[in-house]
């Protein structure tokens, strides 16, 4: 089951890249007034919410935002951490790691959503101010 979900998520991520949706998303986010280092973060968040896999969200955000990282003046370290932390938002049933955690801990159903999904969303939210601080330090 875990391998099936991971494979389906990877296929969906490839479809996003090949179809040009990812590039359009990156350009739309880059055109906003948000700080540039949040572009990979938001891409990862949107992809995670759309298809569920944190791994696919990280990879898709990295590959989609890579061309605009240097153009926008984002430090590569900040971009990498933005991709990974943006992909932490609300882990749920489509994420293979959700199933790894729930199987090993014995948490099921609604308790898994409240527990694990709440934890990942708290990590996601807590990473936003840390990204601002990191960006100040690195630049």
Image (cartoon, helix red, strand yellow):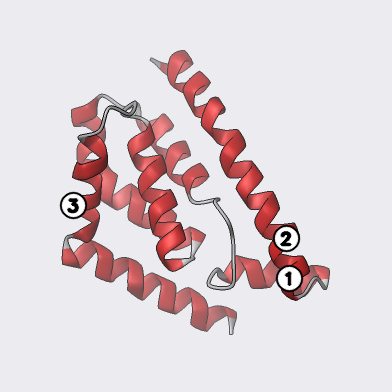
Please tell me which of labels 3 and 1 falls first in the chain. 3
Answer left or right for 75 relative to 70: right
Q: Residues within 10 Å of mark 1 (few under 14, many from 20)?
A: few
Residue at 29%, 68% in the rendered image: 14
Answer left or right for 43 relative to 20: right
Answer left or right for 8 relative to 27: right
Please tell me which of labels 2 and 3 falls first in the chain. 3
Q: Secondary structure at mark 3?
A: helix
Answer left or right for 38 relative to 124: left
Q: Is residue 128 above or below residue 111?
A: above
Q: Residues within 10 Å of mark 2 (few under 14, many from 20)?
A: few
| Residue 128 placement (x, y as % from top left) | 52, 32
Whole-angstrom CA distance, mark 2 to mark 3, is 33 Å
| Residue 75 placement (x, y as % from top left) | 35, 26
**What residue does disc 1 label?**
110
| Residue 116 placement (x, y as % from top left) | 71, 59
| Residue 130 placement (x, y as % from top left) | 56, 27
Q: How many marks?
A: 3
Residue at 38%, 15% in the rendered image: 139
Q: Residue 56 occupies which quadrant of the picture? A: bottom left
The reply to whether the C-beta atoms of the residues labelled 2 and 1 are less than 8 Å apart is yes
Label of residue 126 in the image: none
Q: Secondary structure at mark 2?
A: helix
Of circles 3 and 1, the one toward us is 1
- Residues 128 and 60: in front is 128
Residue at 82%, 73% in the rendered image: 106
**What residue does disc 3 label?**
24
Q: Secondary structure at mark 1?
A: helix
Whole-angstrom CA distance, mark 3 to mark 1, is 35 Å
**What residue does disc 2 label?**
114
Q: Is residue 129 above or below residue 11?
A: above
Residue at 73%, 67% in the rendered image: 112
């Amino acid at each position: 089951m875990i391998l099936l979900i991971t494979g389906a998520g990877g296929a969906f991520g490839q479809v996003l890249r090949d179809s040009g949706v990812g590039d359009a998303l990156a350009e739309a986010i880059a055109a906003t007034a948000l700080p540039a280092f949040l572009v990979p973060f938001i891409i990862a968040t949107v992809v995670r919410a759309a298809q569920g896999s944190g791994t696919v969200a990280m990879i898709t955000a990295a590959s989609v935002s890579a061309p605009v990282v240097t153009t926008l003046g984002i430090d590569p370290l900040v971009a990498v951490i933005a991709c990974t932390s943006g992909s932490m938002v609300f882990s749920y049933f489509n994420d293979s790691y959700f199933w790894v955690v729930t199987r090993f801990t014995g948490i099921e159903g609604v308790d898994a959503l409240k527990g694990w999904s709440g934890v990942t969303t708290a990590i996601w939210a807590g990473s936003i101010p840390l990204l601002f601080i990191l960006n100040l330090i690195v630049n």
